[in-house]
Amino acid sequence: MPGKLVLVGAGPGDPELLTVRAARALSEADVVLKDRLVPDAVVERYVPEDAKVVDVGKRPGGRGWTQEEINELIVREGKRGKTVVRLKSGDPLIFGRGAEELEVALEHGLEVEVVPGVTSATGVPSALGLPLTHRRYASSFVVATGHEDPSKEEPRVDFEELARAADTLVVLMGARRLREIARDVRRAIGDAPMAIIERGTTEEERVRVCRLSDAEEGRVRAEPPAVIVIGEVVKWWSEVVGNGKVEG
């Protein structure tokens, strides 16, 4: 009988933010295909010792496993009747290739299940007490990727339009394009406050608050993985919750 693919979200970083259902799925796995940003502690804590664990995480510069190789491994192990857990950081269907893996599994007759995860877009700011909405300052938020598929003929993310459309803008995978993103958003809404949260919810977390102009002019940089939050909620958080801190 064909096996099963379970797409599992590991949450934003802290292993304790894994959901109960995700922990159960890992405990039932025959094969775990782990992304680079998933903490080793998640595997050590929940995956059976006799399960096969493969780190298929992609590395900066395109090194590591290709998506085609990952898809082939899912199908090969699934056709052997195995339960394959594809373990991804955050939520498995937000800014990843989870939808493509889901499609491949279905095309080859595998059973499929999706276990949602806490996406870093909301989980990382919330863990700091940084709200994306606030009754006085923000009634809407939008989430965008700062790293689009390079094979696209032209980019689809218009940061100027997004900044105008919502009160709070959250950018994932935007560390390498911080200056460009800050420039585009500043054109739309002026010199708004920005929070840069690197390695959120982990012991290595680092938080900085600045203005868009600081990022645009290169006075502030970001190292991945980072969640970027832009809007008046950042000013509120810095004054009320963060006690005006610039770095932590």
Image (cartoon, rainbow, N blue to C red):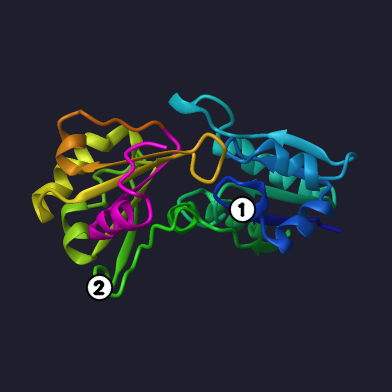
| Residue that mark 2 sits on | 136
Mark 1 highlights which residue?
104
Q: Is residue 109 visible?
A: no
> Is residue 237 shown in magenta?
yes
Task: For mark 2, give the secondary structure.
Answer: loop
Span shown in magenta? 224-248
Q: Residue at x 69, y 41 (%)?
A: 33
Q: Nearer the viewer, residue 112 or 49?
A: 49
Q: Residue at x 54, y 49 (%)?
A: 12
Question: Residue 245 colored magenta?
Answer: yes
Is residue 148 or residue 24 the one in the foreground? Answer: 24
- Could you tell me residue 5's position as x and y percent? 71, 55
Q: From mark 1 to mark 2, how far is it between C-alphas?
A: 45 Å
Residue lying at the far right of the rendered structure: 50
Task: Say if residue 163 shows up in the picture.
Answer: yes
| Disc 2 crowd, CA 10 A, few/some/many (<14, 14-19, 20+) | few
Which amino acid, mark 1?
Val
- Front label number (1 vs 2): 2
For image coordinates 31% across by 46% down, the residue present is 195
The kind of secondary structure element at disc 1 is: helix
Q: Amino acid at mark 2?
A: Arg
Question: Compared to 81, does 150 lie above or below?
Answer: above
User: Callout 1 environment at 10 Å: few (<14), some (14 to 19), or many (20+)?
Assistant: some
Mark 1 / mark 2, whichever is N-terminal: 1
Residue 231: x %, y % from top left: 24, 57
Q: Which mark is residue 190?
A: none
Judge by depth and name the residue closer to the eye, 1 or 114.
Answer: 114
